[in-house]
Amino acid sequence: MTFTKTKLKSGLRLITVPMKGAKTVTVLAAALAGSKYENKSINGISHFLEHMMFKGTEKRPSTLAIAEELDSIGGEYNAFTGKEWTGYYAKADSRHFDLILDVISDIFLHSKLDSEEIEREKLVILEEMNMYQDTPIKYIDDLLEELLYGDQPHGWKVIGEAETVKAITRQKMRQYFQERYTAENTVVIVAGDVNQIQNSKFKSKNYISKLKTIFSSIQQGGSSIEDKVIERQSVPQVKVHYKKTDQTHLAMALRAYRASHKDLPALKLLSIILGGNMSSRLFINIRERQGLCYYISSNVEAYKDCGYLLIKAGVDNNRTLKAVKLILKELRQIRDQGIAKSEFKRAKDFIRGKLALSLETSDELAFWVGGQEMMLSRIKTPEQKLLEFERVNINQIKKIAQEIIQNQRLNLAVIGPYKTRDKFVKILNL
């Protein structure tokens, strides 16, 4: 993979990523906006603003006007908000690059944020909240991060709370927009069939200049303040959310590494061995041999200044304690006995294959580049990333397992028919 990164005097970053053989192009505009940058009174405003950016501009006065234009070319388009950044993208046949660039830049720079639309959209977001709360496999993620980070931005829900969303006004939204959607906080990525782009009306190699012109009106200054995550823990922690469910959903986390940590590649390999695929220890020993669950997996979450190893499962209500005990047993075993060379090799082969599959399309490539730039302000190619995994040795896996699989890092969130956490507290021990 090759890419070109251009940083303008304003601070705006423009990145182009050519993709050999692609027939599509993706335009992604991203801003450093998320619950990390909110205060308690406006929690949820980043996500709310993302919704409002599709409600109309002067040029395209309604949601329908935006949608019809992109639908007419068969384009794919959407947006997303996380704890640390927000992105808006459109993907289409590369012949339509001019159009998707115009639409994405228009909503990013010129959204009206109409007061009546804001009030109407509050109802939509409240229903979205209800949907998440009725979807335990998703809601468990929010509960876990509340447990991990408490009453600080990383512990708040990205969607916010009902009372904070209801209190958001156009004035508050405009102020937040002006603070966060600035040149210094923005990255624009074009990925895919760059050769076709060069033959667009922007003329040969001049589309970078056109991007500069289009985004020249972006505001400068604004807020660059971000609070560091504070982590304090000395014993295992448990959070239980009572709900009449046919299946218990649990999320177990071990505090681990931030996105830039040197041991993150080794942690990801450990996660693959533990529960990253259908031949992993957790899947075989807890699902296949015990029949305790339908889904079980492990993953790594890594933010700018915090992170954790995550295990999620949906288990039989009547055998939840047994499932938790078995997960803890697997953690102790991998910490105390290490891993086999064959497992280690399979994990490296697995990650090599998954990386290739994950970058097959222009939008996936845009997200790959955008995520790195937003989180770390630097981009590593897939080849560089693979080299990091190749450099990991089996002793590093053992070292980090011994480091992070400890009681003072252990957290468990549970959704199910449980009114107290007492039973879980008694067994939560590494």
Image: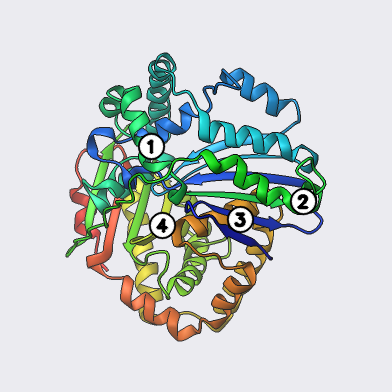
| In this view, the mark in front (2 or 4) | 2
Residue 311 has which mark? 4
Q: Secondary structure at mark 3?
A: strand
Q: Which residue appears at 44% of the width and 17% of the height? A: 117
Q: Quote the CA–CA distance across marks 1 and 3.
A: 23 Å
> Label 1 is placed on what type of residue?
Gln
| In this view, the mark in front (3 or 4) | 3
The residue beneath circle 1 is: 178
The residue beneath circle 2 is: 193
First of labels 3, 4 by sequence position:
3
> Label 4 is placed on what type of residue?
Ile
Q: Secondary structure at mark 4?
A: strand
Q: Could you tell me which quadrant the C terminus lies in?
A: bottom left
State the colouring used for the structure image: rainbow
First of labels 4, 1 by sequence position:
1
The reply to whether the C-beta atoms of the residues labelled 4 and 1 are less than 8 Å apart is no
